[in-house]
Amino acid sequence: MKSPSQPRDRGIPEATVARLPLYLRALHGMAERGIATVSSEDLAGAAGVNSAKLRKDLSHLGSYGTRGVGYDVEYLVYQISRELGLTQDWAVAIVGVGNLGRALANYGGFVSRGFRVAALIDADPEVVGDSIAGLNVEHIDELEAVIKRRGVSIVVLATPAAAAQVVCDRVIAVGVTSILNFAPVVLSVPESVDVRKVDLSIELQILAFHEQRKAGGPLMAVDSQ
Amino acid sequence: MKSPSQPRDRGIPEATVARLPLYLRALHGMAERGIATVSSEDLAGAAGVNSAKLRKDLSHLGSYGTRGVGYDVEYLVYQISRELGLTQDWAVAIVGVGNLGRALANYGGFVSRGFRVAALIDADPEVVGDSIAGLNVEHIDELEAVIKRRGVSIVVLATPAAAAQVVCDRVIAVGVTSILNFAPVVLSVPESVDVRKVDLSIELQILAFHEQRKAGGPLMAVDSQ
DNA sequence: CCTTGTGAATAGCTTCACAGCA
DNA sequence: TGCTGTGAAGCTATTCACAAGG
């Protein structure tokens, strides 16, 4: 149709990007179980989406399937990994080593493919110097130096809400453009910086909304049973 | 045009529901600072969305603003809280008291408005009996009994991936219909059950994708300008 | 005046259904 | 034959722009 071997279309929809990691996880599981080929139907099932959506998503990366057969698992793993940028390894710094930061530092899936926790940073002298998940906790005064020295390109903010914006500004000032924010605040950042946020209490509130609708009649007014 | 005092339209868009907690947080902050009235422009700014979207979202709940003036902060807090079901309190059980479960149990924003951690449950005898955030960790054998006894309606899964589906099935069997899943697996559940998932490694992968694009020009194949 | 609430326009995402190809 | 890849249709969400109303 267009160029004979167009490696990738530069405009992959955001919704598709958000699902690629899901496909990747399903594919890794299949590869481990020795499955060589998978149909869109089966892969979609494993990822919890419908097959039309899966095929449309994959079509944005290129034509990596074989009609009448399906997708080669290994090959698709490679293509999706490459598209997501997981063929290089990313140095991640976690700022804020409270309960959550500790959990993140120890979280296996975090460290796994493509990512490497390269620094733990905190402001509390009580915590600085501790060794967590094999890493020494460094002082927040060293923030800029550590980020530059270790080539950190993604920063995870697990600080208290009040500290998040300050830390955010500082890491942006040394060139970081990707931030994963666990603090319950809206960060203000330049256009060029990507922020993703994970907010535990927001997720609960969304569940409560739906739960209320379901329980709405029966449970609300009366005595619990 | 419609009924004279229609309290709420039963069909609030999912995208709107997902933003209500954001507005609520911004409003709480304003209430604390003694702000009595706020315009859509200012509230939108504080929540990190644009004002047209905010007005459209709020219009789904009812007409709670005053033209030429704005929204009454306290009143809007109440209306959104009620819509989200936060005027009642929800008993939450956390299953899996590893690093993450511990962090969640101690997370302040979790316990705050509307939610109460009512049980901590784990399978590891080493952990059972410990006291975390003032709560006794109970054994997984007690799962069903504890859920019923404490009136738990939302379950947070912070177990290893391999255990998540089994626990999920068990809590659904005793009537739980809202689950917040931190385990990196796709849970299979009946239609009537709501699952929200938080996957730390997926968030990182999405960031890596965008980071790669940004770095893409300088570092990778050189084309374009 | 000022700011809300909302139809209308636009953009983005999902699903359908089938042509195209191994 | 069987499954992918994809136009076209349908749906949801966002943005625009302005009438309605304090």
Image: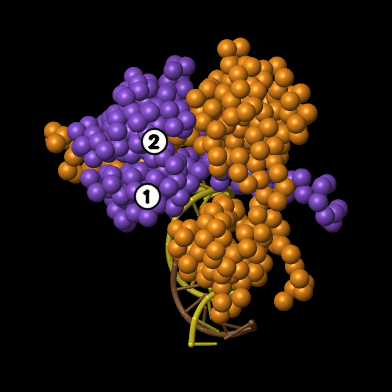
Chain colours: A orange, B purple, C brown, D yellow
What kind of residue is marked 2? Gly
Q: Is residue A206 left or right of residue A41?
A: left
Image position, residue B120 (x, y; %): 33, 30
Q: Is residue B180 left or right of residue A119?
A: left
Q: Chain of mark 2?
A: B
Q: Quadrant of residue B76?
A: top left
Residue B200 marker: none
Most foreground residue, B23 or B166:
B166
Q: Secondary structure at mark 2?
A: loop
Name the residue at 71% across, 58% down. A10
Residue B165 marker: 1
Outermost residue on the top side: it is A125
Residue B96 marker: 2
Q: Is residue B102 left or right of residue D3?
A: left
Image position, residue A98 (x, y; %): 53, 22
Name the residue at 73% across, 29% down. A147
Q: Is residue B69 left or right of residue A213?
A: right
Most foreground residue, A50 or A103:
A103
